[in-house]
Amino acid sequence: MDEPVRIDKWLWAVRLFHTRTLATEECKKGRITIDGISVKPSRVPKIGDIIKIRKNPVTYSYRVIGLIGKRVGAKLVVDYVEDITPPEELKILEIRAQMNTFERDRGTGRPTKKDRRDLDKLQDWD
């Protein structure tokens, strides 16, 4: 049951990414790490590994409980992965959602370039 499986396939199988292609691309971009080291899509995870996935602005952390190569139903995912993301990271999402409700006065027209830059800086967009 615990035969070797690629990290991109495992990420897709436990429903952390919608497609395996997305999981592969994130590995290639260096957004997937195991023990602080960026991994290639062909890396084989081991049971007990801590996998960190950086999705701006939050870094999610997961512990590998089991290895699986085929996608399973959402209810069965808990047998293979444990979410250990710290609550402080999740709080960032709540704060960000509240900050995105920016309102402009009606009738002020489109934002100028300076207004747009200020808005992007406020929202911390890359």
Image: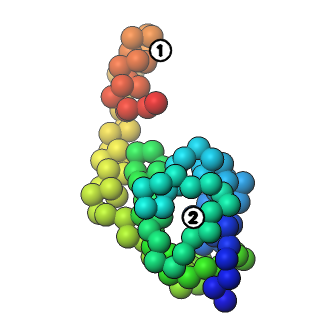
Quadrant of the frame with the N terminus: bottom right
- Decide if residue 63 is on the left or right side of residue 14: left
Whether residue 18 can be seen here: no
Which SS class for mark 1? loop
Q: What is the x, y in percent for residue 62?
A: 45, 68
> What residue would you read off at disc 1?
110
Whether residue 79 can be seen here: yes
> What residue would you read off at disc 2?
16
The one nearer the camera, 124 or 102, is 124
The one nearer the camera, 120 or 3, is 3
Q: Report which quarter residue 67 is drawn in.
A: bottom right
Proximity of marks 1 and 2: CB atoms separated by less than 8 Å: no
Q: Report which quarter residue 103 is drawn in.
A: top left
- Name the amino acid type tagged 1: Arg
Q: What is the x, y in percent for residue 23?
A: 64, 56
Q: What is the x, y in percent for residue 98?
A: 32, 45
- Decide if residue 121 is on the left or right side of residue 55: left
Mark 2 surroundings: few (<14), some (14-19) or many (≥20) residues within 10 A: some
Q: Residue furthest left?
A: 88
Q: What is the x, y in percent for residue 43?
A: 62, 63
**Numbered label tally:** 2
User: Is 71 located above or below residue 29 in the figure?
Assistant: below
Q: Residue at x 48, y 61 (%)?
A: 34
Mark 1 or mark 2: which comes first in sequence?
Answer: 2
Q: Residue at x 60, y 50 (%)?
A: 26
Which SS class for mark 2? loop
Q: Nearer the viewer, mark 1 or mark 2?
A: 2
